[in-house]
Image: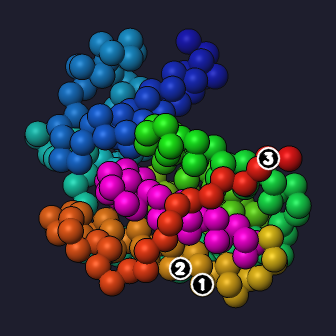
Amino acid sequence: MSLNEHLTVRERTYQAVLQMILSGELAPGAAIDERALINRLDVSRTPIREAIGVLAKEGLVEIEPYRGFRVRRFTLKEVSDLYELRRALESFAIRLAVEHISNAHIAKLQTILNAGVDALEAGQMQAYGAHDQDFHELIAELSGNIALIDTLGRLSRQIQICRMIANKSPEFPKRAAIERDEILDALMARDADRAAKLMDAHILDVQQTLLQQLSGNLNVANDGAPRKSAPRKKQRD
């Protein structure tokens, strides 16, 4: 096998296992069955071990000596810490993005949001979550700061598991879609202060919703929060 072929198999294996974790198929705390993965993905043990090693470095898998591997189960404190960091970094990223954003970028972001609303209305929550991630990733890319982009990328993989849990809330996905509309409005106006403020509020909403769900207080999430009607989907040009 050539080096390129080996890298292709390794990357394919990594992506497959990563998707199992992010989709919830391999739930937090679940043991990872190497033999089952080998049979399912039709690969040898080596790329499976390499994929698990990378995922462990990214904070998604825990290695238990003499016992095997397990999908990481985040504590409430860890989740809170991740979102505090995300709030700071994404607020900074969107300020930088305002300096570089073009009308073409605005149109692309709008297309992503429209696709997210379509997925939400169809009840396709995994697709909705993917469009949500695309929206945040594009804003990070527009910051032009490579170190920031890389850091947010690693952070995103850890919190994506948490994001899937938050999207199970009956009201949160609709509210979050509206919040992203407001963020895009601020970007269109090239208003860095407002964009950063809205991004911070949006991620804080995710953080609070998620922590309340994880702690079992599902009925507390919207107490005292202003009610918003429904996400809007703008006409595509």
CA separation, marks 2 and 3? Answer: 27 Å
Q: To which residue does mark 3 refer?
A: 236
Three-letter amino acid code at disc 3? Arg
Residue 140 against residue 233 in the figure, above or below: below
Q: Do the residues labelled 2 and 1 touch (CB within 8 Å)?
A: yes
Residue 169, percent across and down? 32, 57
Q: Which residue is drawn at 33% across and 84% down?
A: 224
Is 144 placed left or right of 169 in the picture?
A: right
- Displayed quadrant of residue 208: bottom left
Per the image, the residue denoted by label 2 is: 200
Tally of numbered tags: 3
Q: Residue furthest right?
A: 103
Earlier along the polypeptide chain: callout 3 or callout 1? 1
- Crowding near pointer 3: few (<14 within 10 Å), some, many (20+)? few
Q: What element carries label 1?
A: helix
Q: Distance between the residues labelled 3 and 1?
A: 27 Å
Check the image and tell me how it is coloured: rainbow
Q: Position of residue 37 (x, y in %)?
A: 30, 22
